[in-house]
Amino acid sequence: MGFFKRHSRRGSYDLFSTYNYFLPDISDLIWIVVLFLIGMFLGGIITAVLTFLISPEFATTYGMVIMYPVQFIPAMLYASAKSRRNEGFEKGYAIDSNNFGGRKGWSMALIVSAMALAGAFVIEPISMLLPEMSEIMKAAMKMLLDGPVWIVLISVSIFAPFFEEWLCRGIILRGLLKKVKPAWAIVISALIFGLIHGNLWQAIPAFIIGVILGYVYYKTGSLKLTMLMHCVNNTLSVIVSRIPAFEDVEFFAEVMSPWAYVLVVLAFAAVLASGLVIMKSIPLKEGNLGGCDAIDSSF
């Protein structure tokens, strides 16, 4: 009976709760990175096979939606196995909690969605300072967003938020919070988040967004909220890329007067700052990893 009780106390999302007892140390983090690279290699093999057996066009159009989850499967299997081995012997911390400071879930969803939209605009001036993107990189980015809309949305708005948030916030940040100061944990996890994007033009904005996502996760413990923020940010890019008037536009600054652009950025900066103030007001749970719920493993 104790065995069944132990499993009944898992989180509301079985897939999330599979990892509640995995708090990676340095060696685990190295293994996670290595396994992620192996997953990328396997994904590349799948794309090559699709190219050979079907056609390059098919591999380009549908390969991403197939290979994206494959990149994360080895790391997910490792984390799941380690979590199950630790269960019953070590204290667990929920990978997904609801530490909302007394606020309703829907209100938190609205707040973080507004923060995500605001962040996309506030970060743009920083992106404008980066070197001009190479033609090869422009073509690669265009190819990523120019496929069938349902394929792009699955890859960019569903798979990317789910798997990247699982890795960078749910696993890496949650594990680091057990071992280093929260600020360092957030920065390190955001740095890894930037690096997995693989290029300077995505890595710098991703790092900044990753710091915001990390702070939201630290205060709320909610992977659902950071996944939502990630989804909103990515979906905005997809929507803008599908508007004919923005087809050859790289930055919003190109279609607005300087004063109007400055006012818009300042307005969104105020929205983002307000959201961060709300996050700051959420009390942390004593003895826990930020807003993550502690799990009693006794049975």
Image (cartoon, helix red, strand yellow):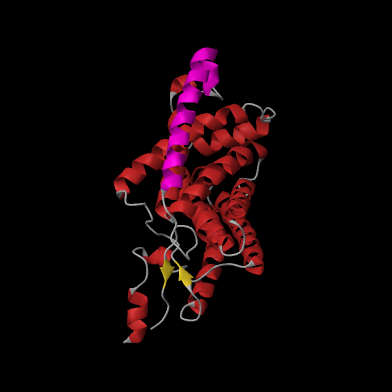
| Magenta residue check for 59 | no
Kindly report the secondary structure that dominates the magenta region of the rendered protein.
helix
In the picture provided, is 141 more to the left or to the right than 280? right
In the rendered view, tell whether residue 245 sits above or below residue 131: above
Does any portion of residue 231 appear in the rendered image?
no
In the picture provided, is 105 more to the left or to the right than 173? left
Toward which corner of the image does residue 175 lie, by quadrant? Answer: bottom right
Q: Who is closer to the viewer here, 184 or 118?
A: 184
In the rendered view, tell whether residue 27 sits above or below residue 224: below
Outermost residue toward the bottom?
Answer: 1
Q: Position of residue 144 (x, y in %)?
A: 53, 39
Toward which corner of the image does residue 278 lie, by quadrant? Answer: top left
Q: Who is closer to the viewer here, 6 or 56?
A: 6
Q: Who is closer to the viewer here, 9 or 35?
A: 9
In the rendered view, tell whether residue 33 sits above or below residue 262: below
In the picture provided, is 82 more to the left or to the right than 180? left
In the picture provided, is 165 more to the left or to the right than 29? left
In the rendered view, tell whether residue 72 sits above or below residue 104: below
Q: Position of residue 215 (x, y in %)?
A: 51, 48
Q: Position of residue 110 (x, y in %)?
A: 34, 40
User: Which residue is located at x 36 percent, y 52 percent?
Assistant: 101
User: Which residue is located at x 62 percent, y 68 percent?
Assistant: 25
Q: Who is closer to the viewer here, 286 or 268?
A: 286
Look at the image and give the residue range highlighted in magenta: 252-281
Does any portion of residue 105 appear in the rendered image?
yes
Total labels: the figure holds 0
